[in-house]
Image (spheres, grey):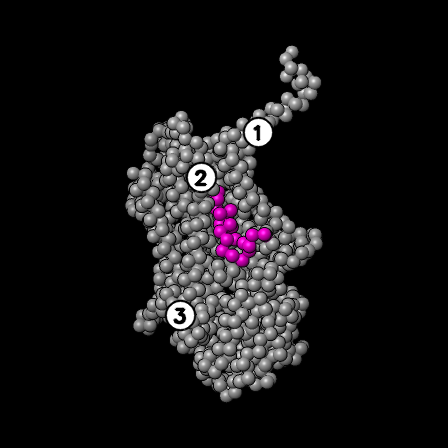
């Protein structure tokens, strides 16, 4: 049993190949990173963890690691990753998730589309923006808290208030934000840039703003220390981190951590990746409270 | 003075002890008493145990599953915060609006179909039954796809036809929230109001007419005053159901940033990090108190319905009003309600289920239609498991619930056992228990329970049986009243014991009521969402949470396809159950 925030379609593609090769069935429960972490921690504290593997973003993984829910497993597949991409506790960061601005070309023409993050707070985009709720969704809490890395502290503080004043539609996580743009329900989203490619494959007219620097987070998969099926879990981790699985995921639009492998997204190689701040549980609680005052008023 | 009398004179307390022993002895000598104790024990445990633990969670300072200390800080935080008042206000506006509007819809539909000569009125009666096969969460989702401000299909139509700059409707508003919840609650109000309208003695109306009143006068002076308790009962019950509902708020209130009780509980218990189950339990206690108060009022009103009852036992048909040429307008109104309650939600689901991704259809769309979403159902183990879990919960849950309900109804309606009033009182709690609050109570109750129920499908089954037992009891009680006592007496006279009489006489006679209750419960369990969302674990995920998470992930086509399959399964189950019930009673 795997709890993860990797999109079901991408995950199932890999798991189906894994099943064909090993005969091992994979149960995958997909939810936002916040829900994955909350469920895993609740089950662990109650002494009834049902998961073998957790597969989600860096920050929630670090929090779960501090709570002691993971087992140490050094996969032989880790040797194919660069040293910088291997976390001593969580193993290889198999992909990066890059957050940017995606828009629907049939509603907003490329000429009228925003050109920078600063443009999003201009009056013409008021009410046209969707983003995950930073008071609920941990990755977005991190993203908002890390804006000062791109803008400096003072400018970022003002920017956050201006962004909230635009009254963006707040949704559960980054995927529904992208889905709203794909359907045209809301024309512009703060979401993963890979969705411009993924939804584009299904016929949605999406593009992303070439921001240059974009923030994001790493993704890991780690074995639970009370995994009901530890050996099957290890086999899956080995396969997942291997060449075949990584190539499959990259083809589906993911930024995998292998040198020179880029997703089939235009200009993907020009994106300058900036890693977001890691927040601990206390900082999350503080930020959640702070953003409730700003975004939910 | 005999020896016994002398002993009693010396110690009079022996008399009362002996008398008690005799009473207890005679009570326990009847098999029905043992059944009463067993059923009472089970129902008492089901209702009181989670209630106690909901309070327990609200006064503890440690997270779920961790030992803690007593505190009142959660109450200070929840209700001392000025931000709690908009929450209360929003919940009341939402509840009152949805209850009021649903009663207006139901009253119009009931009056047109039962009391007028409007054409196709029998067809319109179906309007109140068909929505029961659609999960409420799907009704909310379909209205989002129809009325969202940017690309809702109805808004899109207005923009195209009238050349407007933007659509006139916004589902993400309090008005939108009330409208959709009212549509979901209309069938329930219709059942209460239609029953009262059907059972009304026409002689009162005929007398008024004889004395010179016109149709309008009869309606305003006789019909509606007689209907008032039923209308109040429907409104009160729907108020409670709206305030405790999470289906519509999850889909509309959360993105619209309208905070009501259930969204607040969701936010604290599940929606954000770090979660706070203690605070969620505190809000749960608040919503339980509101529900208990209003369910108490509902029961007062329903007892008035009975005292206002004009059913005389005479075979009569309600007086039918000849609307003349206005009958076509009446049909048009009923048709509009049929459109809102049934046709539009189902059509939009059908459309979205065959679109590659949700969008306003263009000419190009028709060449891109796909069955991929149905293939997804076929190919995905998570979906298969959810269907299996929901069917398991629906079939087993409804059966267990009806078994308990039959025994409990028999005891409360037919026996004169001391303490049967307690049983009625115990059933009152689940009747009022909001799904979200019950789920929180169960989480706290079963996390350290010696039998490993937490994080399994059994905790969901317990929630369903507890919460919906009163529905089953209501269905059976009405049938038991109609079964003449002579049949039981004849069985006993022939030497059958209680259990044999119950099994061989009462159950067959009660079968129509039991089957009716069973059908209602199966359809409810197939679409339950509010409690399930808090209780399920990934291995025991039923359809409600699956639909919600797919919706959150933007998989609207898959949601629509699964929703349609659920509806078809519900129709098949209803048809089988009805056929079996008819066949057997022939």
In the drawing, does residue B114 fall left or right of residue A52?
Answer: left
Range drawn in magenta:
B449-471
Secondary structure of residue under mark 3: loop
| Quadrant in which the C terminus of chain B appears | top left
Image disc number at residue B357? 3
**Is residue B451 located in the magenta-colored stretch of the structure?**
yes
Q: Nearer the viewer, mark 3 or mark 1?
A: 1
Residue at 51%, 44% in the rendered image: B431
Q: Which residue is mark 1?
A: B24
Q: Which residue is mark 2?
A: B406
Q: Residues within 10 Å of mark 2 (few under 14, many from 20)?
A: many
In the drawing, does residue A18 fall left or right of residue B275?
Answer: left
In the drawing, does residue A208 fall left or right of residue B123?
Answer: right
Residue at 55%, 36% in the rendered image: B422
- Answer with mark 3 or mark 1, whichever residue precedes in sequence: 1
Could one spot residue B332 in this view of the protein?
A: yes
Q: Percent x, y for residue B367?
A: 31, 72
Q: Percent x, y for residue B113?
A: 34, 43
Q: Chain of mark 3?
A: B
Q: Percent x, y for residue B366?
A: 31, 70
From the viewer's perspective, is residue B289 above or below residue A177?
above
């Amino acid at each position: 049993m795997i709890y993860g925030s990797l999109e079901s379609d991408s995950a199932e593609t890999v798991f189906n190949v894994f099943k064909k090769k090993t005969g091992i069935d994979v149960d995958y429960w997909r939810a936002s990173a916040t829900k994955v972490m909350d469920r895993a921690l609740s089950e662990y504290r109650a002494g009834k963890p049902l998961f073998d593997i957790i597969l989600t973003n860096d920050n929630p993984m670090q929090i779960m690691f501090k709570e002691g829910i993971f087992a140490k497993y050094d996969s032989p597949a880790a040797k194919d990753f660069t040293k910088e991409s291997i976390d001593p506790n969580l193993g290889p960061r198999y992909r990066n998730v890059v957050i940017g601005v995606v828009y629907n070309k049939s509603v907003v023409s490329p000429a009228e589309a925003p050109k920078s993050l600063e443009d999003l707070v201009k009056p013409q985009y008021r009410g046209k923006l969707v983003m995950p709720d930073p008071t609920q969704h941990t990755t977005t809490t991190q993203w908002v808290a890390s804006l000062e890395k791109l803008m400096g502290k003072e400018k970022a503080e003002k920017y956050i208030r201006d962004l909230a004043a635009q009254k963006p539609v707040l949704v559960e996580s980054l995927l529904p934000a992208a889905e709203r743009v794909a359907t045209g329900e809301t024309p512009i989203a703060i979401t993963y840039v890979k969705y411009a490619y993924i939804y584009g494959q299904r016929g949605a007219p999406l593009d992303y703003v070439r921001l240059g620097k974009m923030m994001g987070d790493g993704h890991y998969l780690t074995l639970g220390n009370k995994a009901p099926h530890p050996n099957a879990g290890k086999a899956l981790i080995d396969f997942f981190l291997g060449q075949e699985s990584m190539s499959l995921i990259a083809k589906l639009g993911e930024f995998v951590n292998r040198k020179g492998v880029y997703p089939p997204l235009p200009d993907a190689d020009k994106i300058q990746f900036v890693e977001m701040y890691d927040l601990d549980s206390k900082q999350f609680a503080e930020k959640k409270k702070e953003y409730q005052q700003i975004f939910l008023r | 003075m005999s020896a016994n009398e002398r002993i009693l004179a010396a110690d009079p307390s022996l008399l009362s002890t002996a008398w008690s022993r005799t009473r207890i002895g005679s009570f326990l000598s009847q098999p029905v008493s043992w059944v009463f104790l067993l059923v009472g024990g089970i129902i008492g445990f089901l209702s009181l145990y989670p209630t106690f633990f909901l309070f327990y969670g609200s006064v503890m300072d440690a997270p779920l599953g961790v030992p803690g200390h007593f505190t009142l800080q959660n109450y200070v935080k929840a209700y001392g915060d000025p931000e709690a008042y908009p929450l209360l206000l929003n919940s009341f506006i939402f509840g009152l609006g949805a209850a009021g509007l649903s009663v207006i819809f139901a009253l119009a539909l009931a009056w047109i179909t039962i009391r007028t000569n409007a054409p196709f009125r029998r067809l319109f009666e179906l309007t109140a039954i068909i929505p029961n096969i659609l999960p409420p969460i799907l009704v909310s989702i379909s209205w989002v796809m129809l009325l969202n401000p940017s690309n809702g299909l109805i808004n899109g139509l207005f923009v195209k036809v009238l050349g407007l700059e933007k659509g006139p409707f916004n589902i993400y508003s309090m008005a939108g929230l009330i409208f959709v919840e009212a549509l979901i609650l209309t069938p329930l109000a219709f059942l209460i109001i239609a029953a009262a309208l059907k059972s009304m003695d026409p002689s009162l109306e005929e007398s008024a007419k004889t004395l010179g009143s016109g149709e309008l006068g009869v309606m305003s002076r006789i019909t509606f005053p007689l209907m008032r308790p039923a209308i109040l009962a429907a409104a009160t019950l729907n108020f409670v159901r709206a305030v405790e509902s999470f289906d519509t708020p999850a889909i509309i209130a959360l993105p619209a940033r309208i905070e009501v009780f259930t969204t607040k509980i969701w936010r604290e218990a599940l929606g954000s990090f770090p979660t706070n189950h203690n605070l969620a339990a505190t809000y749960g206690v608040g919503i339980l108190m509101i529900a208990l108060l209003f369910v108490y009022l509902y029961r007062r009103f329903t007892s008035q319905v009975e005292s206002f009852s004009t059913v005389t036992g005479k075979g009569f048909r309600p007086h039918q009003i000849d609307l003349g040429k206005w009958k076509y307008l009446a049909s048009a109104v009923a048709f509009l309600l049929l459109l809102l309650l049934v046709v539009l939600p189902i059509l939009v689901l059908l459309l979205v289920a065959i679109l590659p991704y949700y969008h306003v259809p263009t000419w190009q769309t028709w060449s891109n239609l796909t069955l991929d979403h149905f293939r997804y159902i076929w190919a995905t183990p998570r979906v298969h498991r959810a269907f299996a879990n929901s069917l398991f919960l629906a079939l087993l849950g409804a059966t267990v619930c009806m078994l308990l309900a039959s025994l409990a109804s028999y005891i409360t309606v037919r026996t004169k056992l001391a303490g049967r009033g307690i049983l009625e009182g115990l059933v009152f709690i689940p009747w009022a228990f909001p799904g979200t609050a019950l789920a929180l109570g169960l989480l706290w109750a079963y996390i350290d329970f010696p039998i490993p129920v937490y994080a399994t499908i059994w905790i969901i089954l317990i929630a369903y049986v507890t919460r919906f037992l009163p529905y089953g009891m209501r269905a059976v009680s009405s049938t038991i009243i109609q079964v003449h006592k002579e049949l039981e007496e004849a069985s006993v006279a022939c030497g059958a014991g209680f259990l044999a009489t119950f099994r061989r006489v009462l159950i067959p006679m009660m079968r129509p009521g039991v089957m009716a209750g069973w059908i209602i419960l199966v359809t409810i369990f197939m679409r339950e969402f509010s409690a399930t969302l808090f209780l399920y674990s990934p291995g025991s995920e039923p359809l409600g949470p699956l639909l919600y998470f797919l919706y959150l992930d933007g998989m609207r086509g898959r949601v629509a396809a699964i929703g349609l399959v659920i509806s078809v399964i519900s129709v098949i189950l209803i048809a089988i159950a009805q056929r079996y019930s008819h066949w057997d009673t022939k």
